[in-house]
């Protein structure tokens, strides 16, 4: 027996027990988070049943203030007026207890608290779904909201019914569409580029900051190649960046352009996509998608060329993040124009 004890690897034993303790803490933390969030939801439901909708009336505010004071006296900190308002917002944002249970399994209260103040229900649901699917940290979620990710996705430019259907499909079937993946513009301020730079400088900066580049694009992008050489009729062409998107199950070719979009870029990208389709696609994959990243866009050119019919998308990139008010105005203008164009096409 003593000999067997001497053969025990103490370091390995310690690691095994440490892993068990860590796993137990994670499970316990999730259980506590789910229990607390469910409690906040029930409190919000109770307050709403008393018509205390965020204490909008003078009397309602007084009731919430008095209730906060008494709860703090009984249970200590953590029951401020703001916390009670969060409880109300939670119940209004997620009125279905079953959906709440699903959200709690993947997102912490810190995540949820960032999302529930968003007024637009579609925008709010977008962040709930994407944060769960891509396993965003609280910090990443905050950055996504601040950089107006929803407004930068193609889905925000669609009719409300389309957005609702896409988000429901994502929640129920766990399937994502390209409109939820691709963005415009892309914010590449982390590349540290100066006022003057070449396409090679842009490409090199992206490769040196590849992880942050992928973070901006989305967690499911996997890098495959830089300057991917393809040969057609004994002529060599080079795809600037080649990625594979895990959930879309397709190759994504990215072409980097310094200036504004030009009509000739379409033919070049179509050539890349048809080559990828013929020689690099494997069974079970979807058709390749092309993304032309430009410093500026010529909207009417893009509209007339009907690029999406060729599985091509065009997006601007920003090497310097503009003031939020300017970015917000620009994005809302783009959304309105896109929806007007869609309505025109429907009426035609």
Image: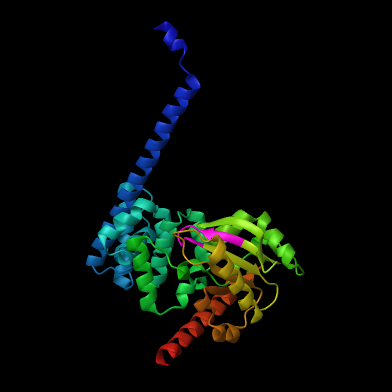
Is residue 29 positioned above or below 173 on the image? Answer: above
In which image quadrant can residue 90 be found?
A: bottom left
- Residue 283 vertical position relative to residue 59 in the rendered view, above or below: above
Q: Residue furthest front?
A: 233
Query: In the image, what residue occupies the spot 37% across and 60% down?
Result: 174
Kindly indicate the quadrant of the structure image that contains residue 276. Answer: bottom right
Q: Which residues are magenta?
A: 242-250
Residue 15 lies, in percent from the top left, at 47, 28
Left or right? Give the position of 256 relative to 337.
right
Return the residue found at the far left.
49
Image position, residue 172 (x, y; %):
32, 62
Residue furthest toward the top?
A: 2
Residue 338: image x %, image y %? 49, 82
Q: Position of residue 161 (x, y in %)?
A: 35, 77
Residue 119 visible in the shown view? no
Q: Is residue 36 above or below residue 233?
A: above
Task: Look at the image and say whether residue 188 sits in the magenta stretch.
Answer: no
């Amino acid at each position: 027996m003593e000999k067997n004890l001497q053969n025990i690897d103490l370091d390995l034993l310690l690691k095994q027990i440490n892993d068990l303790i860590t796993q137990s803490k994670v499970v316990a933390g999730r259980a506590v988070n789910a229990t607390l969030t469910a409690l906040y939801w029930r409190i919000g439901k109770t307050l709403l049943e008393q018509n205390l909708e965020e204490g909008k009336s003078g009397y309602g505010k007084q009731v919430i203030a008095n209730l906060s004071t008494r709860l703090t006296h009984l249970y200590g900190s953590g029951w401020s007026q703001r916390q009670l308002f969060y409880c109300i917002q939670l119940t209004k944002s997620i009125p279905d207890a079953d959906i709440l249970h699903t959200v709690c399994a993947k997102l912490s209260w810190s995540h949820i608290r960032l999302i529930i103040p968003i007024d637009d229900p579609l925008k709010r649901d977008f962040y709930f779904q994407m944060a769960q699917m891509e396993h965003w940290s609280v910090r990443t979620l905050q950055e996504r909201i601040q950089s107006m990710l929803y407004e930068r996705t193609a889905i925000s430019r669609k009719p409300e019914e389309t957005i609702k259907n896409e988000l429901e499909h994502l929640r129920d079937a766990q399937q994502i569409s390209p409109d939820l993946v691709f963005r415009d513009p892309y914010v590449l301020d982390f590349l540290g580029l100066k006022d003057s730079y070449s396409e090679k400088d842009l490409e090199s900066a992206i490769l040196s900051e590849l992880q942050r580049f992928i973070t901006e694009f989305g967690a499911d992008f996997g890098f495959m190649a830089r300057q991917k050489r393809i040969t057609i009729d004994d002529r060599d062409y080079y795809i600037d960046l080649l990625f594979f998107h895990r959930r879309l199950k397709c190759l994504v070719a990215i072409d980097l352009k310094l200036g504004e979009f030009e009509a000739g870029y379409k033919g070049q990208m179509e050539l890349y996509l048809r080559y990828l389709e013929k020689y690099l696609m494997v069974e079970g994959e979807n058709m390749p998608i092309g993304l032309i990243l430009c410093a500026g866009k010529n909207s009417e050119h893009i509209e007339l060329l009907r690029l999406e019919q060729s599985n091509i998308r065009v997006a601007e990139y920003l090497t310097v993040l503009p003031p939020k008010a300017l970015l917000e105005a620009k994005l809302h203008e783009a959304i309105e124009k896109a929806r007007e164009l869609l309505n025109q096409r429907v009426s035609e």
